[in-house]
Amino acid sequence: MNKRPTIILCVLGAVLALTTACGQARAGNAVPKGDDAAAYVGTKFEAAMNKLQDTIGDQRDVTSESGAYFRFDEQYIRSTISSARAGSPESRVSRHRSQKNPDDSIDWYTPGDGTVEYAYLGPVYKSLAPTPWVSMPKSEAGLTIPCAWSGIITACKMADAIAVSYNADKKIVKGAKSLPENRIELTAAVPFGKFIERRVEVLPPKITGAITDEMKKAPVLTTVSLNADGTLNQIVMDAKIEGGGHKIELRYDFRFTGKATAQDMPKLPDASQITVLPDKAAKDDFNRRFAELKGV
């Protein structure tokens, strides 16, 4: 993934600095909306976009949760990911659960030490290995590409959609207000087309082919909440869209939930309960078969 997620989050941090610079905002105070909001924060946005760090990826020793709900007519998906990252070297775990099918679950665990990572297979994926646990070589990239980690990928994709939308039309910014504890909340109207383009949800061709150009212009109400230090607290995207004889409903929510510790990491079972994938070829084959079962 490119660096746009970093861009938008650092950009949003500038809103916090701007609000402070304009006076001691009280909780609930609003800054301008619509065209005025775009002008109000525009200069700060542009400046912040040129000096970026991986804000999401740099938040360490944290737990997070993300939820995904997408409905197209009578077809829908609903899933959650809970994750934690802690320690140095860092261990991390992400637990994926379908709310539609409880048997559709898988955990991905990367210990800070050693050269292997693990998957714990739910019932839907039991055909992938003779044991519930699978070990495999660690990904070479590790966390050098932060948004490659499944624990924060939802936040990265949503931030990317915001960044691309803002670059295309700065008037997507609809308003900002201060919250308790010196937090700030920004609202924007992200075109549904950008939600699709940036793959916040990876949709099958049957659905994308039914989405009209007019539907792609429909706004996805997006709310971003920042902590007092400018780091991300939460991103929410929400929309109901109709067109071409179809109805779409979506809600995507990512939030940091607290401090992570070693106790958030799973305990590995006896070696007899772990299927070893010895090399990259075996890992690639496992991932291919997993994607087939997942329908990706």
Image (tube, helix red, strand yellow):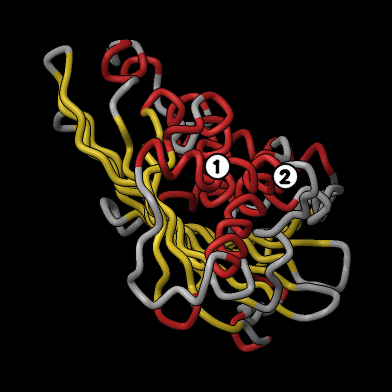
Pointers 1 and 2 in contact (C-beta within 8 Å): no
Which is more toward the observer, 274 or 231? 231
Q: Position of residue 2 (x, y in %)?
A: 72, 35
Q: Is residue 249 above or below residue 183?
A: above
Instruction: Locate residue 293, reporting x and y percent.
Output: 47, 37
Residue at point 74%, 44% (across, down): 283
Q: Nearer the viewer, residue 219 or 270?
A: 219
Mark 2 neighbour class, 10 Å CA radius: few under 14, some 14 to 19, many 20 or more: few
Q: Which residue is mark 1?
A: 157
For marks 1 and 2, give the one nearer the viewer. 2
Q: Mark 2 belongs to which amino acid? A: Ala
Identify which residue is drawn at 62% across, 64% down.
17
Coordinates of residue 217 in the picture (x, y in percent) = 33, 21
Q: Amino acid at mark 1?
A: Lys
**Residue highlighted by disc 2:** 47
96 left or right of 113? left
Q: Earlier in the sequence, mark 1 or mark 2?
A: 2
